[in-house]
Image: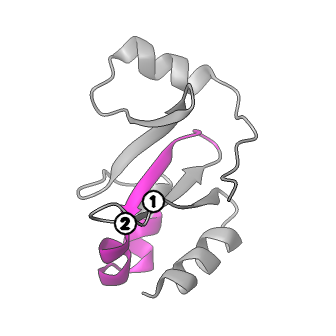
Amino acid sequence: MQIMEFFEKVEAHPELVGEGLDSPEKATPGAIVRHIKTGLSTRLPIAAIEEADWKDIEDVLVCNREPIALQHMTRVVGYYSRIDNWNKSKLGELKDRQAGTYAIVE
């Protein structure tokens, strides 16, 4: 799937918000998408988006299946952080937090 088609599907989805692309200087550039209900942000490498089917990506983004090649991340104190190594208490805090109004500014 092309990246523009991917972002069109994300923006049309009632549970997802596209937060943009990360730094193009990275070895594997990616797109960041936030799940509104949980507040979880997921970084998807562009190559994975181009190879994967929308239904598979959507299922991971809305927590209908475990991510295999995708990592859930959240924005905490101004930077994105992986949450796969967080303990139960920290994950509970994340769920209890209210969604902020974050935006990527160019």
Give the magenta-colored segment's residue range.
37-58
Q: What residue do we see at 27% from left, 63% from top?
A: 27
Q: Residues within 10 Å of mark 1 (few under 14, many from 20)?
A: few
Q: What residue do we see at 29% from left, 82% from top?
A: 51
Q: How many marks?
A: 2
Could you say where residue 66 lies in the image, as x and y percent from the top left? 31, 50
Could you say where residue 59 lies in the image, as x and y percent from the top left? 43, 62
Camera-side residue of 2 and 79: 79
How far apart are labels 2 and 1 at the CA level?
7 Å
Could you say where residue 13 lies in the image, as x and y percent from the top left? 66, 68
Q: Residues within 10 Å of mark 2 (few under 14, many from 20)?
A: some
Could you say where residue 23 lies in the image, as x and y percent from the top left? 45, 59
Camera-side residue of 81 and 57: 81
Which label was assigned to residue 23? 1
Q: Is residue 38 visible?
A: yes
* Three-letter residue code for mark 1: Ser
Asked whether 97 falls inside the magenta stretch, the response is no
Which label was assigned to residue 29? 2
